[in-house]
Image (spheres, coloured by chain):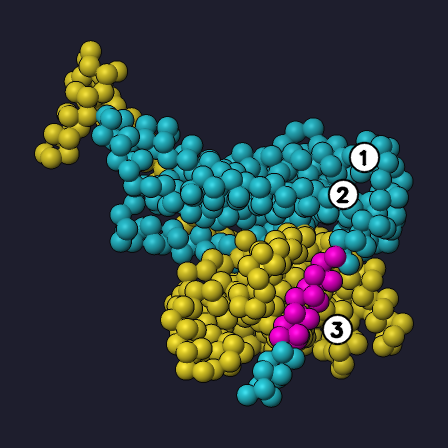
Amino acid sequence: MDVTKQKDKIIYALFWLSGLIIVAILVSIIGYVMVKGISSISLAFLLEAPRRAGAQGGISTTIAGTVYLTVLALLIAVPIGVGAAVYLEEYAHSQSKFASIVNLTAETLAGIPSIVFGLFGFVFLVIFLDLGWSLLSGSITVAIMILPTITRTAQEAILTLPREYRENSLALGASKWQTIWKVILPFALPGIVTGIILSIGRAIGETAALILTAGSSLGMPMSVFDPARTMSVHLYMLAMEGISMDRAFGTAFLIIILILIINYLANLSLRKFSQAVR
Amino acid sequence: MEEALQNQKINILAPTNQLSANHSHSRRRRGEKAIEKILVLCAAIFILAIFLITLFIFAKGMPLIAKIGLGDFLFNTQWSPTKGMYGIGSMFIGSVLITLGALIWTVPLGLSTAILMAEIAPPRIGTILGNLINLLAGIPSVVYGFIGLIVIVPFIRENLGGNGMSLLAGAIILGIMILPTLINISRDSLLAVPREYKEGSLALGATHFQTISRVMVPAAKSGIITAVVLGMGRAIGETMAVVMVTGNAAIIPGSILEPVRTMTSNIVLEMGYASGDHQTALFATGMVLFVFIVILNLSINLFAKGGQGIGRN
């Protein structure tokens, strides 16, 4: 008996070790980028446009590209994604064939690699619809990629709404849509916000699909039909072509900071959400 | 009839509609119908998206496969677009090898971390670990690729030989990237094992570890398999991190220290300047990838449905 207990102790130590390894990997990745990247950050780095393919100057146009692209993608995906969630949870019958197909396609869509989205965006948006390498092509592509996240988080949020809320609202004479707009959506808001935050993270990090759809022009995009380069694409170009490792570190630093902020906000809104449920 | 009655009742109750109940009633009904139609459209966009993606990728990639044959395209290892030779055999093998390489070291590590979080660590520590792992999942692949290029590649070059850009570097970076998928889904399925299983086993005199290894893990098996399959899907589809650290030579590597090119890398490297048959061949590569991933996901849906979502979040 004692021998078994002894053995269990050693095995437990191994489990703890695996946890430690994971923490060490994470801390060293983030720590490394922070330490190496901080010295590249300056006001000029953030505010100046890149010169000589990014070897000189800052990264202002790529920051603008990232922000425009993310906002556009959200403008497209949030209404559609939340609308789909409302339909699936509030209108569709539970055994509806249509709803189960939509759920299945949403799951399938979530599993498709970004390079395949890139190929699709390239042949459909850039070539077939003739939108060219542009902010619009890029953001529509990213919008399709984040749709499943937005819909799923909204669905989960709507699902947690207590039955009585819905019934009370209907009993008070509100129509179905009034109930959705005034009762269900406000209740589901924290869940929807969580989905949006997660999607922002995805949009900031997206690279492969954007190289094929938004182009890699370093100019400042002036309209949705202009090509744009995001920070992630810029990091790829700087590092792969060895243009400027300093600036690559600075860009990676900025991306990591954004991801940390997003992660913090997502946790915050998740916590709020679970409190609201309670 | 019943519905109409119900609506009538609602209208009587609703103060805003009291003045012209009948008129606003029909208008409201029409409005409600229109809203429902818009919402159906939102949901239908998912189906439309999958339909268009399938249609366009196939329409663009199929002609080349029809021309040279699927067998030749998949298994011929000669890729030289300038000579009109389009076999993705070496890239196909490259993708498989790098995925296996990533899984070999992460499945044991991921599973034991999942067990730690679900069974051994106090809940508070489990939550903290969970948050850190979500953070790991949030780091973009291009940042992983950058770290790999700056840290892991030189490390391999100086300590193990070769030029560092290698299958090994890819397997390490890719492994780190799929860890969150493996851990989160395995942990969830371990947590979903009914309490009685565990209590029964402990009551029969089994130690905690015996309970974990003989009762909990077998009971969570389908979830753990789902985790591994999803991790596999992520690994095969990953592009940026792999392209930055593997050297991208379109050859079958002789050792883990030699460079490889995956199917995804092939697309992102050559799409920028490809045209004609060459471009079609890249779409055909994407088509193979797409079919592969869809089959993986559908098989999870059909056989191991654990209720877990697919994808990184």
Which chain is disc 3 placed on? B
User: Dots 1 and 2: beta carbons under 8 Å?
Assistant: yes
Name the magenta segment's main secondary structure: helix
Label 2 SS = helix
> Residue B244 in the image: x percent, y percent?
76, 60
Point out the residue furthest to the top here: B19
Q: Could you say which disc has been placed on residue B168 in the image? A: 3
Nearest the eye: A268 or B32? A268
Side (left or right) of A123 relative to B32: right
Nearest the eye: B287 or B303? B303
Residue in view at x 38 percent, y 45 percent:
A160
Residue in view at x 69 percent, y 28 percent:
A222
Point out the residue furthest to the left here: B1
Label 1 SS = helix
Q: Dot 2 surroundings within 10 Å: few (below 14), some, or many (20 or more)? A: many
Q: Which residue is mark 1?
A: A46
Point out the residue furthest to the front here: A2
From the image, state whether disc 3 or disc 2 is nearer to you: 2
Which lettered chain is shown in cyan? A
Q: Which residues are magenta?
A: A11-27
Question: Residue A265 magenta-drawn?
Answer: no
Between the residue at mark 3 and the residue at mark 1, the CA separation in whole angstroms equals 36 Å
Nearest to N terminus: mark 1 or mark 2: 1
Which quarter of the figure has residue B228?
A: bottom right
